[in-house]
Amino acid sequence: MRVVIAEDSVLLRAGLIKLLESTGFEVAAAVGEADGLLAAVAEHRPELAVVDVRMPPGYTDEGVRAALVIRREHPEVAVLLLSQYVEERYAADLLSAHTSGVGYLLKDRVADVSAFLDALRRVAAGGTALDPEVVSQLLLRRHNDPLGRLTPREREVLGLMAEGRSNAGIAAALVVSESAVAKHINNIFTKLDLPHAEGDHRRVLAVLRFLDGET
Amino acid sequence: MASTQGPGRARPHAPWSSAAWRDTAFTASGVPLHFAGWAILGVPWWGLMPVNATPILLLVAATALPVLLLARPATRAHRERAWAMLGLDVPPLPEWPDGPFRSPLRALRTAEMWRELRYHLLVGPLLACGALLVLACWTAGLLLSTVVLYAWALPDGSTLSLGTHAVRTALLCALGVLLLAAAPLLASAVRALDVAAVTTLLAPDRAKELERRVEDLAEKRAEVVDAADLERRRIERDLHDGAQQRLVSLALNLGLARETLTGVPDDAMKVIVEAHEEAKEALTELRTLIRGLHPAVLEDRGLDAALSGVAARVPVPVRLRVEVPERASSTVEAVAYFVVSEALTNVVKHARATSVEVAVLREGATLRVVVGDDGVGGADPARGTGLTGLARRVRSVDGTFRVTSPAGGPTTLTVELPCAL
């Protein structure tokens, strides 16, 4: 799988290249700022771009803006944003335009190699990977409160769904059977009045739209 | 020297004391300047003696203008005199903004100019009269007290001779001694009056001076607060670019080692796993620390966005309401952010609360931050270092800080901040 990396820290860029190349990815280009990223994506047409949020020149949300441009101009390129802090507001920007082929994770997550690679593959395949921290921020914003009708377990399942996990992934995380997960999900959709959707991806979309909706 | 003796107070001195001579010299030194104003105004009339209206007006104008022009240099001269002879430092008046030639008429509209004129033309001449009286006292005293020597030298039968007019001579001599004793007292009194006049009429108005000082200090404090805020951002950037990246890289390498190394002895692998976990914990701690300093999202998207991140990380359920239609200055936003994140930390540490409400509302020119929890209460700003730090940071931008926390709860923290410094 061909990947473009945009990360301004030289050290971490080298680390990411090593990680990806040693696990079967092909790093087409690795750049240090947003403009270089857009050029590299246009040139190499990778399947996935791994992008740091905070990059020169402004060191604020260059990566988020670049990701939006990439998703608009090259819809076939999936984008995974990495950041030292995840902010629900940046996630909302990203997700209001696209919920497929995007991811937003804390940089710390790269340390959990297999989970990180899992998220990479999920995003590249058109799925979603949202950091648990983002999800908890999103849940917080919905305080009045169809969410109050959910049981604690259902809230957990909702959170994992929002992160972009599949039924199997949720079942593994909660150590329950997949059929139990499916039952929880059914309950959630009923309680929140969401249209029942087939497939992980559209399900995430429905959940995120709900979480991102007005409070 | 003089300051220890209080140059503004009249007190008796012995005629031979240095203080007596100092007072005399000080009062006498003012005489030429004190008379200069009226000399400029009056002397030309002596020679010219105009009779018609126009020349009279012209002469008035021609004499008044130099007086106005010289008022400020004369004031400076009196300040120098007070400093050189009494060690009394009279603060300078504010400079005329437009230079000495355009300003005099404009300066007439200032209270300072009128006070100066009052000194130079009214009080000054009176003080000069006093100084002359002092000098006269000394001279007459000296002459009369020594009259006895003169009389002794005279032949018998003359008007003052000691033999025939002993009583008259003795009386005159006594009068001389009395005058000598009175001279230092008079000099001291005139000096005290002069000092009082100089400090009230030639120094800047105290209230105005204080006003200026308050403005100056407020400005300086705002600069300091801004500088501290800027410093916090710099530290945040440095940590973000340095230690944090290094730690991520370290954790990544350890993670890679943990997953890819095969054939490693069990105890070696155990060490790798431990190091990996510790690196990840260090990352989480560092992230919390850095975010508490100054989150980038605050600058970028404002309080609402930044606070939702803080609230989400708190293990207690938080209801967050942010209504700030117009953003406050970045320093004030940083303080509000700090208040909420510190207050939440306190709640988690001490309150044993089951829910927290946070409201940040803009009301006109104030930003109102309320953090309330349903915990055990008993928070005391006098003891908790967290609350003290909070109060200090709030005061640094002229905010108000109130905690109500009865034992048993609930606790409410209310902070009001001015939106602009």
Image (cartoon, coloured by chain):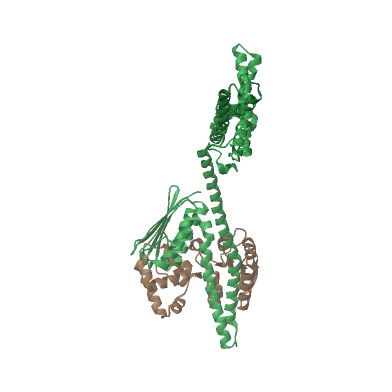
Chain for colour brown: A
Chain for colour green: B
Q: Is residue B316 left or right of residue A84?
A: left
Residue B244 drawn at (x, y percent): 58, 68
Q: Is residue B188 above or below residue B363?
A: above
Q: Which quarter of the image is occupied by the N terminus of chain A?
A: bottom right
Residue B16 drawn at (x, y percent): 61, 37
Q: Which quarter of the image is occupied by the C terminus of chain A?
A: bottom left
- Residue at x 48% of width, y 56% of height: B392
Q: Is residue A79 above or below residue B78?
A: below
Residue B26 drawn at (x, y percent): 61, 34
The quadrant holding residue B183 is top right
Residue B34 drawn at (x, y percent): 60, 28
- Residue at x 46% of width, y 72% of height: A200
Report if residue B278 is visible in the image.
Answer: yes
Q: Is residue B261 above or below residue B292?
A: below
Which is more toward the observer, A25 or B259? B259
**Total number of numbered labels?**
0
Which is more toward the observer, B254 or B421? B421
Which is more toward the observer, A111 or A210? A111
Report if residue A85 is visible in the image.
Answer: no
Furthest residue in direction left, as rendered: B408
